[in-house]
């Protein structure tokens, strides 16, 4: 199974042997301990990841108020992760059990193509998601027309179209071949090209879909942290925070747009933590595999310890399986819909919050500088905050006239 992305490390040393049509020595099967551990961990991680990513897609597609620009990127990421788990993860189970490629020539081409497509589309989706977060937090006004649902769909279509075309080359670089050992002949899915031609292709892929996205994410998250921490909110709301309310003329209701500094500080910490998790986990979980391939590229005798290779693969699978957790665990809307989908919670789903962390922070920062709330866009007039639940007397007509549904514009994304 050498042509699978997770097994590329074995390809370079075998190529010259295959070209010379010499035997590879005596073949030794995996130990029983390795088979049990490998099958169990791969099945567990891939199973949980497949269920989690399928639920993400179902939540967004079946729930109207969840169809937001941010959630569109989550669906794209979930679809890419599903490809990684099914095309790169599950075949490792048969590899551990049989020790050879069992899916034939068509399976070799198809699985190789879809695993690279999933990996590259996942990286591009994270990059697009990172840029969207940067605009939403650092440029909330521009986000109103840049972070729209239609624009997000177009970006996702472009991402998948480009990666699909890019990965076509793997259909011409992969093939099945026989590995001749002294005691057995095994079928393998490997690369047609030699090590000399393969390395430039891999390093290009490594730079475009790992190094550059990680560098961009580091810069953008640094700018986000700079905005959040260099403009701290006062800690004492009585002395330093100017609270204000704006009475709207829609149905005779009054909407409170004030928010305490403690609530904003908590939201700030939550966003910062989530952004840090995105960068750190993406970098760390891909690093063992990427590092091993780079190191083996410069070694005459590649390091191919089975247990360490298994560790590298599991890290990659875990990256795809954990994405639903790190992107959705901090979203109240996702948790509520998940409970409804699993029938684990109350049938009546609580109303999702309708405020944006970026806009709330911007609004309070402006008001704390002494500016009038009237200077804000009219879109803020329809924003409700968690402070509303502590002001039961502010909505005198709420029992007679229901509140308007929150807008799903890009500037009002709840993450």
Image (tube, rainbow, N blue to C red):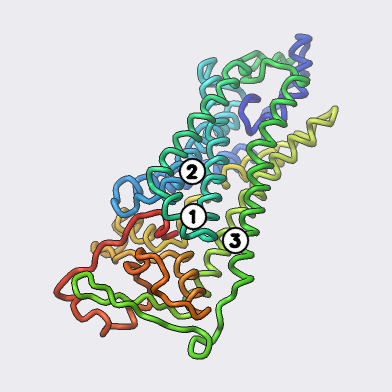
Image height of 163 relative to 67, above or below: above
Residue 95, position as x, y percentages in the image: 59, 29
Q: Name the side, left or right, on which 208 lies relative to 97.
A: right
For the residues labelled 1 and 3, the Cα–Cα distance comes to: 17 Å
Q: Answer with the quarter of the image where residue 7 lies.
A: top right
Extreme top residue here? 21
Q: Name the side, left or right, on which 320 lies relative to 14.
A: left
Which residue bears the numbered disc 2?
77
Q: Nearer the viewer, residue 134 or 141?
A: 141
Q: Name the side, left or right, on which 112 lies relative to 384.
A: right
Which residue bears the numbered disc 1?
327
Residue 78, position as x, y percentages in the image: 46, 43
Residue 279, position as x, y percentages in the image: 62, 53
Rate crowding at label 1 as few (under 14), some (14 to 19) or many (20 or more) other CA atoms within 10 Å: some
- Mark 2 lies on a secondary structure that is helix
Q: Answer with the quarter of the image where residue 154 lies.
A: top left
Q: Nearer the viewer, residue 157 or 8?
A: 157
Query: Badges 1 and 2: C-beta atoms under 8 Å apart?
Result: yes
Earlier residue among tags 1 and 2: 2
Which residue is pictured at 46% across the width and 38% down the height?
156
Which residue bears the numbered disc 3?
224
- Mark 3 lies on a secondary structure that is helix
> Could you tell me which quadrant the N terminus lies in?
top right
């Amino acid at each position: 199974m050498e042509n699978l992305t997770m097994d590329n490390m074995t390809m370079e040393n075998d190529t010259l042997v295959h070209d010379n049509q010499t035997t590879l020595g005596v073949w030794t099967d995996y130990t029983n301990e390795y088979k049990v551990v490998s099958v169990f961990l791969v099945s567990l991680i891939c199973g949980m990841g497949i269920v989690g990513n399928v639920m993400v897609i179902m939540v967004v597609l079946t729930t109207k108020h969840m169809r937001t620009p941010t959630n569109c990127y989550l669906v794209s990421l979930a679809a890419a992760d599903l490809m990684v788990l099914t095309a790169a993860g599950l075949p490792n189970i048969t590899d551990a059990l049989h020790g050879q490629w069992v899916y034939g020539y068509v399976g070799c081409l198809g699985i190789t193509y879809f695993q690279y497509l999933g990996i590259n589309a996942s990286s591009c989706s994270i990059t697009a998601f990172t840029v969207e977060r940067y605009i939403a937090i650092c440029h909330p006004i521009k986000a109103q027309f840049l972070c729209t649902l239609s624009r997000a769909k177009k970006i996702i279509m472009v991402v998948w179209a480009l990666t699909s075309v890019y990965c076509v080359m793997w259909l011409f670089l992969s093939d099945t071949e026989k590995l001749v050992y002294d005691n057995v002949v095994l079928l393998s899915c490997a690369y047609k090209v030699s090590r000399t031609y393969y390395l430039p292709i891999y390093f290009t892929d490594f730079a475009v879909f790992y190094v550059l996205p990680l560098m961009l994410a580091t810069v953008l998250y640094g700018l986000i942290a700079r905005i959040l921490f260099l403009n701290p909110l006062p800690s004492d709301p009585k002395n330093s925070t100017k609270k204000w309310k704006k009475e709207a003329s829609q149905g005779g209701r009054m909407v409170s747009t004030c928010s305490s500094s403690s609530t904003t500080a908590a939201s700030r910490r939550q966003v910062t933590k989530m952004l840090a998790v995105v960068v750190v986990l993406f970098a760390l979980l891909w690093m063992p595999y990427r590092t091993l391939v780079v190191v083996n590229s410069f070694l005459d005798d590649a390091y191919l310890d089975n247990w360490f290779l298994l560790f590298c693969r599991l890290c990659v699978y875990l990256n795809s399986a954990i994405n639903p957790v790190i992107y959705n665990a901090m979203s109240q809307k996702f948790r509520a819909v998940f409970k409804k989908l699993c029938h684990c919670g109350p049938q009546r789903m609580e109303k999702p919050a309708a405020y944006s962390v970026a806009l709330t922070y911007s609004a309070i920062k402006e008001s704390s500088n002494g500016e009038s709330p009237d200077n804000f866009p009219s879109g803020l007039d329809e924003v409700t905050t968690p402070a509303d639940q502590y002001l039961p007397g502010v909505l005198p007509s709420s029992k007679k006239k229901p509140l308007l549904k929150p807008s799903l514009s890009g500037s009002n994304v709840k993450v």
